[in-house]
Image: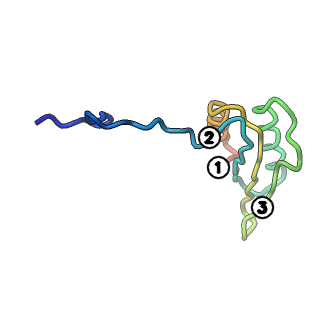
Amino acid sequence: MKKDGPGETPPGVEVEEKKPLIEYPSVYTFKVMGMQGPGFAEHVRELFRRLMGSEISPDSIREQPSSKGKYVSLSVSVYLLSEEHRRSIYDELHKDPRVVYYL
């Protein structure tokens, strides 16, 4: 008896098309964490300005210091048109040496 390999659909089983988890265009919030210090929030604002191609409103960024004050978390809400744009922003956050963690 032949077994179905990974990713193969058994005969007679209908596959439901998966809907994307995020529907675009959409407002999406990135969480960006780094060392607390002068200029980190401005660095992140400039990074998003470059990636979005326009200024980021101060109302679009919320700042939360860690309990011991060593780190700061920024929530940055932006209007995205596609999944590709969201992924490209995550790629840039991954490459940035000042970004310690991101969600």
- What percent of the width, then of the height, locates residue 64? 77, 61
Quadrant location of residue 6? top left
Q: Amino acid at mark 1?
A: Tyr
Quadrant location of residue 47? top right
Mark 3 crowd level (few <14, some 14–19, many ≥20, 10 Å Cα): few
Q: Is residue 56 above or below residue 50?
A: below
Q: Earlier in the sequence, mark 3 or mark 1?
A: 3
Secondary structure, mark 2, is: helix
Q: Nearer the viewer, residue 16 or 103?
A: 16
Mark 1, residue position:
102
- What percent of the width, then of the height, locates residue 37? 80, 55
Q: Nearer the viewer, residue 30 or 25?
A: 25
Residues under labels 3 and 1: Cα distance? 14 Å
- Which quadrant, please, contains the N terminus? top left
Return the residue found at the far bottom: 67
Q: Is residue 69 above or below residue 55?
A: below
Disc 2 to disc 1: CB gap under 8 Å: yes
Q: What residue do we see at 84% from left, 45% from top?
A: 42
Mark 2, residue position:
94
Q: What residue do we see at 71% from left, 44% from top?
A: 28
Residues under labels 2 and 1: Cα distance? 8 Å
Q: Earlier in the sequence, mark 2 or mark 1?
A: 2
Q: Amino acid at mark 2?
A: His
- What percent of the width, then of the height, locates residue 86? 66, 36
Q: Which mark is residue 64?
A: 3
Q: Earlier in the sequence, mark 3 or mark 2?
A: 3
Residue 87 located left or right of residue 67: left
Q: Amino acid at mark 3?
A: Gln
